[in-house]
């Protein structure tokens, strides 16, 4: 691959290893009649030759993604609600036990995590630029600053509220290209013995499962323990812990602290060694990933075309941001997948970005079961299959496309 860009962590050269072509903003659901105004960019991924950070080749302006109408709701999954409640309780029992502790969450969305903290009466602040979801959190009694977190925001919060014992971000840090400003902000705001904890999709899982749909505009970085270790060091922080998480198709929770403030856990050393042994970021591994992704693409397209020829009906399940990559990379239109059902009110009645599949509420799925449901929300498979058992009992089947195309 010859295309290059400049690394957002260390300024050296990023070499492209996979290209998904022209793509829309993944959460920009289209009002019927407004298709002509859609924004597109080139979605491709590369790796920095120096710091090994995997990142998008092109950046989408943040205002195109995170605004008043940003539709994603953290509370849309019962598994994720339990996940965040468990973590909030852990923070309350470990990091937030001193006198008047303070926690800041970046990308607090509708307040699913901070809800438990607020109920415990602990000082907190959510930083959330997307107005609609920020207001939802505020109505739950959560303190929210409607803003993008960056260095200036951190300085302002430090002046008004003092240092934070915990700075936390779930599925948000990997969305933010301007990392130098973020990490300067973290070092400004963090208490001397505080922790910066963030969790995001793990590149090791993406490679293993060929889960190419984790690549979309909002996922700018694809972290590994190695690249986070290096990124932390360059910005005056230290990677002190890692934890594998089963959610969202396989994530890692990273804990950063000031150098020497915390002891590095054995889990960090083990994950770094695992990545080395797997040659996770070697060109040969990345080339093999691309080959497997291209096979998944071709297999899924053949399967869908075959169903169309046989007169079978296929419906999509979960109008995920991930599904924008799948539908636009493969060229899936309403002739192959008649609509996508989704519980999110702001997505219903609209068209999926780029591919323009209608989004309908789950009742449309229940009214007339299709022959197949293409599970775009495969990361919530257990939860969804459990509540849609009647679909299987009526003879319906699920189509999955990671790690390979298969029907269950
Ligand atoms: N943390 C929630 C979760 O895990 O369900 C929400 C994740 S959502 C995919 C990403 C969130 O990050 C959005 O609500 C978006 O508005 C927010 N966001 C984007 N850039 C941000 C920034 N610079 N500072 C704080 N939040 C940001
Ligand atoms: P996510 O994979 O980014 O969490 O997005 C999941 C999408 O799937 C979100 O739009 C909500 C939707 N969804 C349903 O429609 N039904 C469900 O049962 C679950 C868990 C999610």
Image (tube, grey):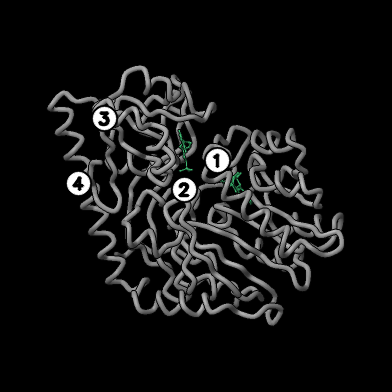
Residue at 33% over, 47% down = 21
- Between tags 3 and 1, which lies in front? 3
Left/right placement of residue 235 relative to residue 139 reads left
Q: Position of residue 145 (x, y in %)?
A: 75, 45
Is residue 336 visible in the rendered image? The answer is no
Above or below — where is 128 with respect to 101?
above
- Real-space Cα separation, disc 3 to disc 2, in angstroms: 33 Å
Q: Within the image, what quadrant is residue 119 found in?
A: top right
Q: Position of residue 189 (x, y in %)?
A: 76, 63
Task: Specify which label sits upstream in the sequence, 4 or 3.
Answer: 4
Task: Specify which label sits upstream in the sequence, 3 or 2.
Answer: 2
Q: Within the image, what quadrant is residue 324 found in?
A: top left
Query: Around disc 1, counting alpha carbons within 10 Å, would you say few (fewer than 14), some (14 to 19), or many (20 or more)?
Result: few
Above or below — where is 304 with respect to 286?
above
Residue position for label 4:
298
**Residue 314: mark:** none
Indicate the secondary structure of the residue bearing disc 4: helix
Label 4 residue near ligand 2, CB within 8 Å? no
Residue position for label 3:
396
Residue at 31% over, 43% down = 329
- Between tags 3 and 2, which lies in front? 3
Task: Specify which label sits upstream in the sequence, 4 or 2.
Answer: 2
Query: Around disc 2, counting alpha carbons within 10 Å, would you say few (fewer than 14), some (14 to 19), or many (20 or more)?
Result: many
Label 2 residue near ligand 1, CB within 8 Å? no
Residue position for label 2:
217
Left/right placement of residue 56 relative to residue 314 reads right
Residue at 41% over, 37% down = 384
**Residue 64: mark:** 1
- Real-space Cα separation, disc 4 to disc 3, in angstroms: 23 Å
Q: Within the image, what quadrant is residue 276 found in?
A: bottom left
Indicate the secondary structure of the residue bearing disc 1: helix
- Asked whether the beta carbons under mark 1 and mark 2 sit within 8 Å of each other, the answer is yes
């Amino acid at each position: 691959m010859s295309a290059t860009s400049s690394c957002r962590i260390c300024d050296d050269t990023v070499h492209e290893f996979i290209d998904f072509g022209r793509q829309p903003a993944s959460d920009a659901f289209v009002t019927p009649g407004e298709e002509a105004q859609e924004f597109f960019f080139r979605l491709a991924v590369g790796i920095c030759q120096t710091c090994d950070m995997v990142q998008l080749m092109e950046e989408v302006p943040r205002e195109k993604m995170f605004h008043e109408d940003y539709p994603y709701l953290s509370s849309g999954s019962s598994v994720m609600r339990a996940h965040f409640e468990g973590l909030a309780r852990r923070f309350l029992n470990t990091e937030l036990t001193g006198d008047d502790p303070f926690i800041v969450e970046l990308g607090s969305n509708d307040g699913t995590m901070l809800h438990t903290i607020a109920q415990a009466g602990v000082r907190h602040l959510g930083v959330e630029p997307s107005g609609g979801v920020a207001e939802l959190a505020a109505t739950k009694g959560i303190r929210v600053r409607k803003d993008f977190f960056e260095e200036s925001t951190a300085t302002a919060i430090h002046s008004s509220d003092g240092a934070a014992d915990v700075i936390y971000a779930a599925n948000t840090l990997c969305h933010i290209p301007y990392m130098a400003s973020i990490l300067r902000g973290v070092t400004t705001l963090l208490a001397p013995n505080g922790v910066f904890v963030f969790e995001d999709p793990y590149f090791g899982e993406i490679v293993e499962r060929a889960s190419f749909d984790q690549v979309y505009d909002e996922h700018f970085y694809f972290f590994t323990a190695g690249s986070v270790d290096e990124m932390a060091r360059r910005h005056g922080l230290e990677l002190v812990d890692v934890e594998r998480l089963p959610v969202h198709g396989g994530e890692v929770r990273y804990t950063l602290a000031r150098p020497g403030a915390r002891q590095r856990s054995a889990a960090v050393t083990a994950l770094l060694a695992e990545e080395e042994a797997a040659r996770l970021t070697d060109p040969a591994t990345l080339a093999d990933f691309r080959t497997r992704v291209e096979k998944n693409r071709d297999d899924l397209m053949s399967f869908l075309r075959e169903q169309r020829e046989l007169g079978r009906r296929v419906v999509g399940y979960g109008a995920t941001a991930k599904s924008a990559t799948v539908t636009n990379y493969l060229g899936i239109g309403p002739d192959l997948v008649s609509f996508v059902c989704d519980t999110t009110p702001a997505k219903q009645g609209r068209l999926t970005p780029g591919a323009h599949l209608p989004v309908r509420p789950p009742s449309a799925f229940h009214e007339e079961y299709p022959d197949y449901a293409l599970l775009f929300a495969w990361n919530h498979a257990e939860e969804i299959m459990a509540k849609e058992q009647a679909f299987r009992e009526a003879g319906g089947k699920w189509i999955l496309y990671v790690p390979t195309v298969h029907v269950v």
